[in-house]
Image (spheres, rainbow, N blue to C red):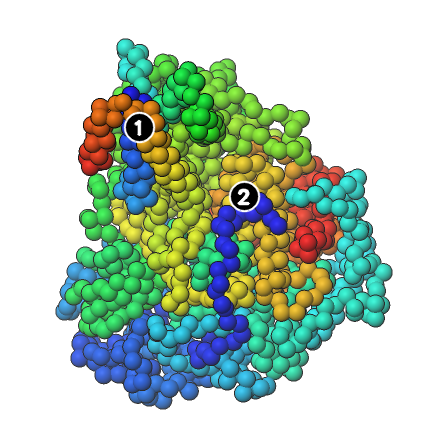
Amino acid sequence: MSTTGFNSQNGAGGGQAYANGPSQNPVALQQPPGVGYGMTHQAPYNLMQPKAPMPPGPGLYHSGPYQPVPPVSSYQSSPPVSSYQAPPGQPLLTRPPMGGPLPHTPPQSASPSPGPRMPPAQATPPPPAVSSNSYYPNAQQQQPPMAHAWQYGTAPPPMGAPPPMNTPSGGPVANHVNLPASSTAPPQSSTAYSSPPQGPVSHNATQPPGPGMPPTSLHGYTHPGTAPPPMNPMPPHTYQPGRPPYGPPPTGPPPTMKPAPPPTGPPMGSATPPPPKADGTMAGNGPQTPNTYNHVDNKMAGPPQSGPPGRQLGHYPSLPPGYQNTSAPPSSASPMHPPMPTATQPYTQAPQPYQQPSAGPGPAQLSPSLAALSLQSSTPEALRVVNLLQERNLLPPGPIPAPTPCLPQDLQKINCNPEVFRSTLTSIPQTQSLLNKAKLPLGLLLHPFKDLSQLPVVTSSTIVRCRSCRTYINPFVSFLDQRRWKCNLCYRVNDVPEEFMYNPVSRSYGEPHKRPEVQNATIEFIAPSEYMLRPPQPAVYLFVLDVSHNAVETGYLNMVCQSLLDNINALPGDSRTKIGFITFDSTIHFYNLQEGLSQPQMLIVSDIEDIFLPTPDSLLVNLSECKELVQDLLKSLPNLFEKTMETQSALGPALQAAFKLLSPTGGRMSVFQTQLPNLGVGALKSREDPNQRASAKDIQHLSPATDFYKKLALDCSGQQVAVDLFLLSAQYCDLASLGCISRYSAGSVYYYPSYHHAHNPAQVERFQKDLKRYLTRKIGFEAVMRIRCTKGLSIHTFHGNFFVRSTDLLSLPNVNPDAGFAVQMSIEENLLDMQVVSFQAALLYTSSKGERRIRVHTMCLPVVNSLSDIFAGADVQAITGLLASMAVDRSVSASLSDARDAMTNAAIDSLASYRQSVLTIQQPGLLAPACLRLFPLYILALLKQKAFRTGTSTRLDDRVFAMCQLKYQPLAYLMLMIHPALYRVDDLTDEGALNINERTIPQPRVQQLSVEKLSREGAFLMDAGMVIYLWVGRNCNPNFLTQVLGVPNYTAVPQNLYLLPELDTAESQRTRAFIGWLRDQRPFFPTLHVIRDESQLKANFMQNMIEDRTESALSYYEFLLHLQQQISK
Amino acid sequence: CINVLLTRDILFLIVSIIAFDELKTDYKNPIDQCNTLNPTVEKVKKIKRVKIALKLVLPEYLIHFFFCVMFFCAAEWLTLSLNIPLLAYHVWRYMSRPVMSGPGLYDPTTIMNADILAYCQKEGWCKLAFYLLSFFYYLYGYEKPFVSSSFPLLSCLGISINII
């Protein structure tokens, strides 16, 4: 059916018999209320932290000042050395017990705990002396995480002296955990592990105790209707190899599920009745919103020609039967509803467990009887069948959280944060043929160097690793006994080194499973000297500035110099930090900043054919020693070239010179370029034909014109130099060629089209904010990242900015906190005997303080053998992100239309596979599992994204930049670029608002991206990642105009408004708080544009209305019909 | 004499197969790898003498091309028709190589892609089989009178493999 799908593997459906249906699984997979990744804004990860400062068992090795702590779980109270041995009846303990004694364990989960020697369960927290342990102090967990909180070393951590127990009185001192009090320890080790507030991980926050989760085991059915099912707190050792695979546990409802709540905000021009309240009553009773699908669209659309998204398709009926504007009488509408069998696919409207408190009306619709009913459901919410043609309001009101893997609760609790490490399939298929059958891409999305506000840091003379595969010890290894551990990647049995027996957190001996390395899925090691090929390099920054006439015209030089002057003390580094400057037009200018000179000395090299360094020693200078000279230079630089008439640009030679300058040390090169380089090596020609911008034919010139930049980037990569490119140009600059310099040297690309200091204030503001972030963010030098995975899996392709050095090793001359990576995986050997697989990403880097550090993330995922489980574990956002990266590759290597076809086929194939293999009863309509219900929408959004759209005028550089972004941005920001969020903001209320830092942040619900949702009476905010639009309707509420925009009426709204006036009204404060909160969530600065009907940017705003039909692209409904047609073929 | 050249071809192929295997098993940096396989143009300063250090892939193509020309001249139509597909493949392969300033076929930034690496390895094995078959075909088809003289070549081949 699909010839151009992404899956090149030709799996001829291997005869893997897969069991369907629930299996006996005694492990309660749900998390206890409040235990899990995300409390909303209350330091999500700190929920796991009480594990680490766990009171030491009252064992033999207990030393130090404590009294034996009242044990909270059986493991604590067990007798000494063997204390973590399994209780009788459990032959082998495969992994350390760690989840037990959580202080916040709810009583209902603790009480039936069958621990043999368990004292009466107490929900009391551990003694305060323990929880205030400086290893994971709670001191800062209330504090909202701040983006720059990661600047370690700049100030002593705001904590008191470490508690006395942290200074080990005896035992191996060398192997102690780095204390925050020591000078090298970054404060992040002392703060709570809190991901940004309201991050997508924050599900579970209001999870009601019981009914949210269908019971996992069969005997769960014996508790019909009773409120919370008694959780089955089996100790974690239920998790043994040799046990039959725990099959398809229909548990742990992935959190993406959200039945469509009624839309707020009256859609324009049509009386859309709210969906029936009882849309969760029984099977298939989807909200029969008689929606105004197309008739509003046609206002937007020009000539109603329907361009095919990929394949040729016929003409679609403009009004779908179920969507007739005249609300169909129920009798005629009901045959449209698929006869969903209640027994197999019950529509369970559980109280939305993963909802945010502010989620609005969702849970309120639930009647108690329904709650009881949902307990009996056997199908996880993720597999609830959704007929996409019938159900329109599929968007959840808030951010979509990542699905939770179906892991035993104790494993899931310590699993890696999904913002850092995420898989497209949270259940890994057992065989490649099964994966091929599912037609979903398997891959990982990583954000390895993300700013974390709390990160355990370990200083250790020996870092414990597997002897054969070199995996770092992690929470998912199993301890065979106290002296041996089994690697979870290659299954080799290793010895536990003597030093590892001592636990510096509890200062006890003989508990290797309680070491922080085994308690945290994300951890950082301070590496000893074996991890250095050379002494750690200092932080070196080189700025290469375009000073041609064109560049001076834009006025960017002022901004760069001013930003550098402002932030020169905030540049990450230590006393060895070096800095240097090169400017270029048709010649290359060096600046001698050597100490002792009275003013900077400019040296001009005009021989660009054979570039050389005039004074190699004094061009890169120590920042602290020569700060005054540097400041002098920055002040004089903008004036120096004020009158220049030189229009040529010798970027290539300048880069060569910069490379020569940096190659002895390595470092970061920041290149600012404003025009097409046209002199010397690396000169480029304009390849863009403006007449072809809107062509629906294939887009040419997406691949580089020359390999000069790529070769130079590889040289740079070899010398640990990364090149960051800032492109500020109104004309075509051939980003496809220039971008290679950053792509292969692990740099980043910033693009400010039409930058001008006076004409484009929004760009100026964005440039300024981006520069500040760029200059002050954390940086890692001479980094490599290796991704290991359990034997049987292998890495297929990497996506991102780097150079692939080996099959699993990425060379990253610099690594920055805003870089994301994607990895395609394939299954080489069948994972038959495994219940779980693990992935480990280890990032070895030199911090700006000259420390060699290793950051290790480990993720554990279950292995399943049935197709329905694979679908139940699909993570639609991650799949979209990975598909976008694959499509970028495809459009460069093959063609854009090929990539578009492949994306469409990805949706068709997976839904067809779902229909054929998982659905037991064939129904009419376009059916998708609930977890993939947004998949067609996201695919359509990708097809209409700047990178892949055809037919709409798109500048080549814009397109290429969008492609760079798709490959390089971490998933959270990527999703906003693909599918912007639309909010109605003229009626913001404090209802359900967040409260962060004494500020109230209203939480309007996300609207669908369709013009029908807009209303002339309202004002709408569209958050598209890099840019935020505020669209003001013509008849907008005058209250909003006066109180928020500060103008008397609509016509007085200025054409170019980039800043909301700071008015002292409640409405203004709410709006600004909301926008500020949106901006705080990402490292870059989205500009705000206020748009009226006549604004030029209105076209951009409307192009983001991806559910509507445009001149050249299908509407969402047409796209769904197209999919349906292809599937039923 | 044909076999002398063919032997070289086989040697080149063996080396490149081994090289790809090294790459896969993480022994070698892809940049070095591609530098071994692609011909490198060394610009010697001042003298401006361009010295092309002949490396593995291009010579193999050239030798094969030379064979075809020779078969053409000798009007060996059957043998030529056996070799034409490979010649066409070589031309196609070289035309569709990644953007590169120098001559060469392999791009260090894409060579680590699992698909491309697997393709290169498979290509190497297939061509090795083809060359070996044609080696014996030429040996017994054309050089019957010289079997004795070309025998040392065989042992030479064996020795070279041992050396590698």
Residue A697 in sight from this viewpoint = yes
Residue A654 image point, x, y percent? 39, 23
Q: Nearer the viewer, residue A742 or A102?
A: A742
Query: Which of the two residues, A899 or A47, is positioned nearer the viewer here?
Result: A899
Q: Amino acid at mark 2?
A: Ala
CA neighbours of label 2 inside 10 A, class few (<14), some (14 to 19), many (20+): many
Q: Amino acid at mark 1?
A: Leu
| Label 1: which secondary element | helix
Is label 1 or label 2 in front?
A: 1
Could you tell me which residue is drawn at 44 percent across and 26 percent down?
A: B78
* Place of residue A301 in the rendered image (x, y in percent of width and height, measured from the top left): 77, 43
Is B104 situated left or right of B26 in this image? right
Query: Within 10 angstroms of label 1, few (less than 14), some, or many (20 or more) residues?
Result: some
Q: Which residue is mark 2?
A: A887
Q: Which residue is mark 1?
A: B139
- At x 32%, y 22%, the residue is B2
Q: Give the letter of the chain under mark 1.
A: B
Choose top left, top right, bottom left or bottom right for residue A608: top left
Q: Chain of mark 2?
A: A
Residue pictured at 62% horizontal, 53% vertical: A908
